Image (cartoon, helix red, strand yellow):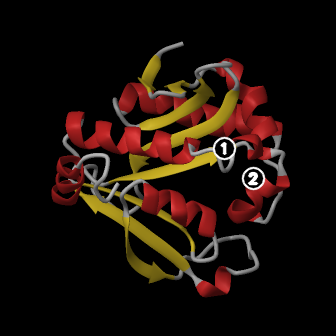
Amino acid sequence: MAVYLTTPRLVLREFTGADVDNLVALDADPEVMYFINGGRPTPREYVEQVVLPRWLRYYRGSPGLGFWAVEERASGEFLGWFHLRPGEGHPADEPELGYRLRRSAWGRGFATEGSRALIDKAFAEQGVRRVLAETMVVNTASRRVMEKSGLRLVRVFHADWPDRIPGDEHGDVEYALDRADWQRQRAAGPDGTR
């Protein structure tokens, strides 16, 4: 198991083939999947044959970008995953931040803690120019994580999703943080805008 990043409460590590059960269980929760596809589970075969192999390729082809399993440091419990990867239609130096956590991890600040750490690493070590994240307008919990992580609302748009989810008529939002704003936030310290 290769550890990518640690925070005070989390370990972000590379996925392995042994994570199939973790991913299947995560995606089996209708509430976790609600804003993805309306609450349908991801079939085990799809996780084994498509999802996990695609994620594992990132470690070879795009060092520093990809998907990471997240575990609670104190217990070793699998909590979900984060990604920082090239966003569709965006240049390589504008990766997209994403996360999916088990319901038991919601409301505990884990999503913000992991997001901030990935954002900091991307700007400090990988030379990215901008980090972005997207969600549905009505996904207020995810939007709060983006805001607490230092990202700011850039635009509202309408994506063409294959699944109709209540609230999608309101559209989607893009949040972003560029290098200059990240540097200002870092300089402001813990009592600043972050």
Q: Secondary structure at mark 2?
A: helix
Query: Where's residue 142, x and y in %?
Result: 58, 61
Residue drawn at (25%, 50%), measured in percent from left and top? 93
Q: Quadrant of the N terminus?
A: top right
Residue 22, quarter of picture: top right
Query: Where's residue 50, x and y in %?
Result: 65, 39
Q: Residues within 10 Å of mark 2 (few under 14, many from 20)?
A: many
**What label does residue 32 carry, if any?**
2
Q: Quadrant of the C terminus?
A: bottom left
- Between 193 and 45, the one nearer to me in the picture: 193
Kindly report the distance in space between the C-alpha atoms of the residues bearing marks 2 and 1: 7 Å
Residue 151, quarter of picture: bottom left
Is residue 159 placed above or below 79 in the rendered structure?
below
Residue drawn at (48%, 41%), measured in percent from left and top? 113
Mark closest to the chain's N terminus, 2 or 1? 2
Query: Where's residue 157, x and y in %?
Result: 48, 82
Residue occupying the far front of the picture: 191
Q: Secondary structure at mark 1?
A: strand
Query: Where's residue 161, x and y in %?
Result: 63, 72
Q: Amino acid at mark 2?
A: Val
Q: Is residue 154 visible?
A: yes
Q: Amino acid at mark 1?
A: Leu
Q: Are marks 2 and 1 in contact (CB under 8 Å)?
A: yes
Read off the residue under disc 1. 101
| Horizontal arrangement in the rendering, residue 35 relative to residue 91 (left or right) | right
Q: Is residue 45 visible?
A: no
